[in-house]
Image (spheres, rainbow, N blue to C red):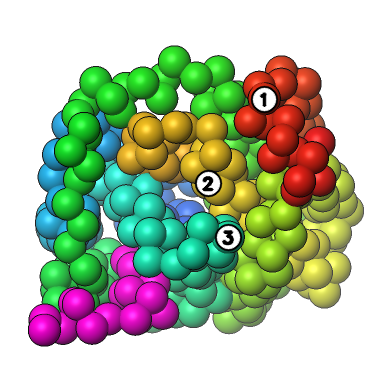
Amino acid sequence: MSTAARSTPALVHLVLALGGFAIGTTEFATMSLLPDLAHDLQISVPVAGHVISAYALGVVVGAPLIAVLSARVPRRTLLVALMGFYALANGLSAIAPTYAWMLGLRFLTGLPHGAYFGIAMLTAASVVPADQRARAVGHVLLGLTVATIVGVPLANWLGQVAGWRWCFGIVAALALTTAILVAMLTPEQQPDKGASPSRELGALKRSQVWLTLAVGAIGFGGVFSVYTYLASTLTAVTAVPARFIPCVFAAFGVGMTAGNIIVPYFAERAVMRAAGLLLLGSAVTLAFYSAAAAHFWTVTLDVIAIGFCGALATVLQTRLMDVAGDAQSLAAALNHSAFNVANALGPWLGGLAIASGFGWTSTGWVGCGLALAGFGAWVVALITDRSPVALVAGTERGAV
């Protein structure tokens, strides 16, 4: 019997979460290292924010494209290939000589992001009972959230000590390790006999898929609006010494990890209700950000609360499993495209607010507006979701 065949669900989840840790470290640490990156590449911090947007655009483009074209590729094979490419792209980012090169390489790095998470979550859910899907998804995302506690602060510290380029080199090594472990420990899963690009594209015909994606694309943008410029805000507004900045980023990770542990237990009974409450909670915590930024302890507590509401990603991933029918791969990947639309939208709008003279803390109000707009999309999804299956599920779970 092979090693992969003997792997327990917990071990499979751990290996898949390691890939999430690598992705989370580079995605969020790049935001925390923007001031250093901007200084080294001789550009302003708002312009450096375009590097974040380029990565997000890569996710948006790559996730659906890879999901459709790889419909007949075994999941383990695909996961190994995606992590291998991710390792290569991050390694090249570590030696990017100019802003233009960095912009292009971050776009390429983003291509496998969404497809990896989408396939990893489907793999994680497939090795546990159906009523534990939300927790399985949460376990994979714990890799990303733990990255915000451990990976991002360490990368921020390393950036200050040795330079921001080391962050991408370390992530390349983590991604390569993940590819090896996935090949060794993850069970091979052949695609369904009827799997095809056209069947995956069938997800695009479902209005609830689009509405769920809209909730994430808009509503989660507020988190990225604040997080992208958090380091600069802590320096310019809170007047925090540089050595304490990693602590605040770790606090965000603590909140997000707590959310991904706690929220799935409730989401399994009421997915839509959980999503709505998280959006409203996000709007409130982001509205408080402007006032909270004046003091170290208040901004830290507020950042924890903002991170907790980041569990919205897990909730919406589970929701997509319910509404995507037999086009699971594309829908799962599109969820990460949606969140990286948010990753592009939030920093862009936040940067506009800062560049227009509204100050660093204006990102909180930008974020609050995006969370409320996402809640509006959630309301539309709730009102229009009146299929017989949805009504039965809503009655049983208390979702509607």
Disc 2/disc 3 C-alpha distance (Å)? 14 Å
Main SS category, magenta section: helix
Q: Nearer the viewer, mark 2 or mark 3?
A: 3
Residue 143 screen position, x and y as percent: 44, 70
Measured Cα–Cα span from mark 2 to mark 1? 21 Å
Circle 2/circle 3 CB separation < 8 Å = no
Q: Is residue 287 above or below residue 143?
A: above
Residue located 38% across and 59% down the image: 126
Closest to the observer: 364 or 184?
184
Q: Quadrant of residue 39?
A: bottom left
- Viewer-side label of 2, 1: 1
Crowdedness near tag 3: few (<14), some (14–19) or many (≥20) residues, C-alpha within 10 Å: few
* Residue at numbered disc 1: 388
Q: Residue beneath label 3, please?
A: 131
Camera-nearest label, 1 or 3: 1
Residue 378: x %, y % from top left: 72, 30
User: Could you tell me if residue 167 is visible in this image?
Assistant: no
Amino acid under disc 2 = Gln
Q: Which residue is mark 2?
A: 317
Q: Callout 1: 10 Å neighbours few (<14), some, many (20+)?
A: few
Choose the circle earlier in sequence order: 1 or 3: 3
Q: Is residue 246 above or below residue 226?
A: below
- Relative to 49, residue 6 above or below: below
The residue segment tinted magenta is 1-22
Relative to residue 74, is residue 137 drawn left or right? right
Q: CA distance from mark 1 to mark 3?
A: 20 Å
State the residue in front, 73 or 312: 73
Q: Secondary structure at mark 1?
A: helix
Indicate whether residue 9 is drawn in magenta. Answer: yes
Please report whichever mark, 2 or 1, sits nearer to the chain's N-terminal start: 2
